[in-house]
């Protein structure tokens, strides 16, 4: 994809690069033909809440999932859907609702998060041309840079949990059964944990970010996301002399209590080959 982008005069880095990259990479993880990515790309940046037709796209995902589980029953293989069909849980097969739940998380959970991180990386490298030279000088920096971009972008804002018992958090009483939202970007910009928290430090060590969650709530797709980002950084360093940033349109997340940027709606760039 990087080689093809270099041949183009301009590249739209969100829908035209990050979305196809995420979708094609997912086919390899799920053991599906890469041609299936064309269907997934058609769902857009987020299957459920990115656009006005999110309900229609959600229904399209539901139909696709049902079709694939039916296909896998007739022609089982080593793909994601066949594995779930054959899985045993406490002596029984999974129900369709349970299998569909896994599928929904798989297709929606790591979609816009990876896309937002990829587009943010491309914009950063366009604004900081010296960063590519810094990464080329030591390939071990691909790993530290991957962690740093996840920390800095923090593509997932919050996940809420239900407190099973009454407790106190930061001098605030929490009643049993109430919800507590864990705000990953706030933790990832904690000046008590990170030096220069609002700066990208590509060789930051240690980097105890919680961009993938923490402990038993750690993201199951984290190794997949890390591999995509490391591979992208290596491909860019190997093939690209620089990235010319032509235009950007930030993607803003607006809620009643905050507004923050999460990646970009569109990014026009030119990849300059070596």
Image (cartoon, helix red, strand yellow):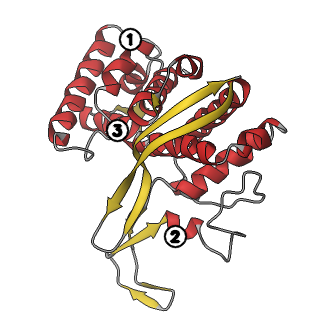
> Which residue is located at x 31 percent, y 40 percent?
101
Residue 157 appears in the figure: yes
Element under disc 3:
loop
Q: Where 162 falls versus 29 (above or below)?
A: below
Name the quadrant containing residue 62: top left
Disc 1 packing (10 Å; few <14; some 14–19; many ≥20): some
Left or right of residue 245: residue 196: right
Badge 2 or badge 3: first in the primary sequence: 3
> Which residue is located at x 61 percent, y 66 percent?
198
The C terminus - image quarter: top right
Q: What numbered label is drawn on residue 111?
A: none
The foreground one among 185 and 180 is 185
**Which mark is nearer the camera, 1 or 2?**
2
Name the quadrant containing residue 43: top left
Disc 2 packing (10 Å; few <14; some 14–19; many ≥20): few
Left or right of residue 222: residue 98: left
Q: Where 147 falls versus 209 (above or below)?
A: above
Residue under numbered circle 1: 76
Q: CA distance from mark 2 to mark 3?
A: 24 Å
Residues under numbered marks 1 and 3 in contact, where contact means CB atoms less than 8 Å apart: no
Residue under numbered circle 2: 186
**Which mark is nearer the camera, 1 or 3?**
3
Q: Whole-percent x and y of residue 155? A: 47, 53
Name the quadrant containing residue 143: top right
Residue under numbered circle 3: 45
The N terminus - image quarter: top right
Residue 91 appears in the figure: no
The foreground one among 246 and 26 is 246
> Which residue is located at x 41 percent, y 28 percent?
16
Q: CA distance from mark 1 to mark 2?
A: 45 Å
Q: CA distance from mark 1 to mark 3?
A: 30 Å
Disc 3 packing (10 Å; few <14; some 14–19; many ≥20): many
């Amino acid at each position: 994809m990087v080689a093809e982008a270099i041949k183009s005069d301009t590249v739209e880095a969100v829908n035209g690069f990050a979305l196809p990259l995420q979708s094609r990479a997912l086919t390899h993880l799920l053991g599906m033909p890469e041609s299936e990515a064309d269907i997934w790309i058609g769902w857009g940046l987020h299957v459920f809440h990115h656009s006005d037709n999110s309900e229609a796209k959600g229904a399209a995902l539901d139909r696709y999932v049902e079709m694939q589980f039916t296909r896998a029953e007739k022609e089982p293989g080593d793909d994601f859907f066949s594995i779930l069909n054959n899985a045993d849980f406490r002596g029984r097969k999974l129900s369709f609702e349970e299998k569909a739940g896994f599928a929904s998380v798989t297709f929606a959970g790591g979609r816009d998060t990876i896309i937002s991180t990829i587009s943010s990386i491309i914009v950063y490298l366009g604004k900081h041309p010296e960063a590519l030279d810094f990464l080329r000088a030591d390939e071990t920096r691909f790993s530290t840079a991957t962690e740093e971009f996840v920390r800095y972008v923090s593509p997932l804002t919050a996940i809420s949990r239900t407190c099973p018992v009454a407790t106190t958090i930061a001098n605030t009483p929490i009643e049993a059964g109430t919800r507590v939202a864990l705000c990953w970007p706030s933790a990832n910009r904690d000046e008590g944990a990170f030096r220069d928290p609002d700066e990208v430090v590509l060789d930051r060590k240690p980097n105890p970010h919680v961009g993938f969650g923490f402990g038993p709530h750690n993201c199951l797709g984290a190794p997949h996301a890390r591999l995509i980002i490391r591979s992208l950084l290596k491909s860019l360093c190997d093939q690209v002399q620089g990235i010319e940033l032509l235009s950007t349109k930030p993607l803003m997340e607006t809620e009643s209590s905050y507004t923050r940027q999460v990646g970009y709606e569109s990014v026009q760039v030119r990849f300059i080959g070596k």
